[in-house]
Image (cartoon, rainbow, N blue to C red):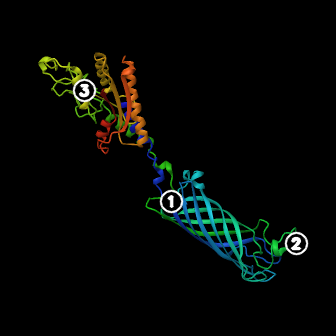
Amino acid sequence: MKKLLLSTLMASALTLGANAQDDFNKWSIEVNGGFNKPMTSIASGYWTPTLNIGHADLGVRYMFNEKFGTKLDFGFGSFSEASNSPSGSFSTNYWRANLQGVANLGRIMGFESFTRRVNLLGHFGAGLGQVNPQENLNAGFNDNVYNFIAGFTGQVKLSERIALNADITTILNGRQTTTFDGSANITPATMPNPSTNNGYFGAGAQWWTGTLGLSFYLGSKSTHADWYVAADKYATKEELANQIGEIKDMLKDSDGDGVPDYLDKEPNTPAGARVDSHGRTLDSDGDGIPDHLDKCPFAPGPASNDGCPVEEVKEVDYFKKAINEGYVNVYFAFDSAKPLGYSASSVSYVANFLKKNPSVKLEVKGYADELGPEDYNLKLSERRAKAVYDQLVAAGIDASRITYKGYGEDTSVDKKSADARQLARRTSFEVK
């Protein structure tokens, strides 16, 4: 039992980060603005500024975990000519709406090993948009397009609620009909009829954006997934050593009855005494004589007769009474089908009774506490019943005289009490 408790408590200490998904915020709102640069298609003679100020985007992002997420964003702005453009002016408005996947490259590549304030995100997705020239041949034309988008976002952590963003993104428009300057149609040489084929030959228009902005983190946790480091939730070697030392102290068993001192309500039990799960000496028949000194532990009698009744009694009647009143049980540790040492002697009592009463048949009834899924507990209770059944058969009892069944969870005890749950982890016996 000590080994079982030690392993359980150590496992709890080693898995402090098991619920990491609940330790960080997942939502953020992103606001960015900056420049754009249309690359192709631009009609001959139309030039665009290297950095054209005129783009903004808004987005909402959700992180599934600290490494991957998704975002929905909306971008809009306008293109215009360079001051020295030889062919004249143009002005073209646009908008785009995209659904993108997001990868927290900083966490994936382990940035936390050298910085906790700088991060890098990658994003890729697709969406819809519109190009709307305001001048030249196609002025007023709403050119509907689809697009693919990809980019990188550098981050600087300003606080647990705000981060500064610097993003560079490329967008590839598909089925765009007009050039970005609005002065010409996009038509491949193999399509001689631009009135019917304009733009319908794939993704051939490309442009860039570069922005600065802010991410605002939402949620009740202390940090966001962008900056969450799972390793921070695990104990150090020194902390684990201290915890293990404390656990070992807790598991001392001064009287050697198999129940550690911190659970033992009778820490000075005599050697060889049968005890319950709280380390208290058992007196199954309530005659004031503990079982280990009582020659008839299930039949009350005076001390002068070694605990046996003076009158001749039928042992089977007292055995049934002891069963009905729950004095003969085999107890188990949490999530285990192996009988605990302090209760295994109950199997010997049952085996001896069956040998003395060859006409009696018996059912082994398994139970579990209410922790865990109900289906799992039903199977666990059956394994416990089967384990005791196997011990009785091994003790020489004919298998045809014994049946076993798992009855699942014992709901008669207070599942909030650890002591009550221990009493529920048992097998009982029923004389047929």
- Checking the image for residue 192, the label placed there is 2
Look at the image and tell me whether residue 220 can be seen: yes
Give percent across and percent down for residue 105.
60, 55
Considering the numbered disc 3 on the image, is that residue within a helix, a strand or a loop?
Answer: helix
Q: Which marked residue is nearer to the observer: mark 1 or mark 2?
A: 2
In the image, residue 412 sits, relative to residue 404, either above or below, namely: below
Compare residues 78 and 309 and report the one nearer the observer.
309
* Residue corresponding to mark 3: 320
Q: Residue at horizontal 58%, vertical 60%?
A: 70
Q: Which marked residue is nearer to the observer: mark 3 or mark 2?
A: 3
In the image, residue 259 sits, relative to residue 312, either above or below, namely: below
Residue 226, located in which quarter of the rendered image?
Answer: bottom right
Is disc 2 surrounded by few (<14), some (14 to 19) or many (20+) residues within 10 Å?
A: few
Q: Mark 1 belongs to which amino acid?
A: Lys
- Checking the image for residue 135, the label placed there is none
Q: In the picture provided, is 310 more to the left or to the right than 409?
A: left
Q: CA distance from mark 3 to mark 1?
A: 60 Å
Compare residues 226 and 393 and report the one nearer the observer.
393
Considering the numbered disc 2 on the image, is that residue within a helix, a strand or a loop?
Answer: loop
Look at the image and tell me whether residue 1 can be seen: no
* Residue corresponding to mark 1: 26
Q: Residue at horizontal 15%, vertical 26%?
A: 287
Q: CA distance from mark 1 to mark 2?
A: 52 Å
The quadrant of the image that shows the C terminus is top left
Considering the numbered disc 1 on the image, is that residue within a helix, a strand or a loop?
Answer: loop
Earlier residue among tags 1 and 2 = 1
In the image, residue 7 sits, relative to residue 309, either above or below, namely: below
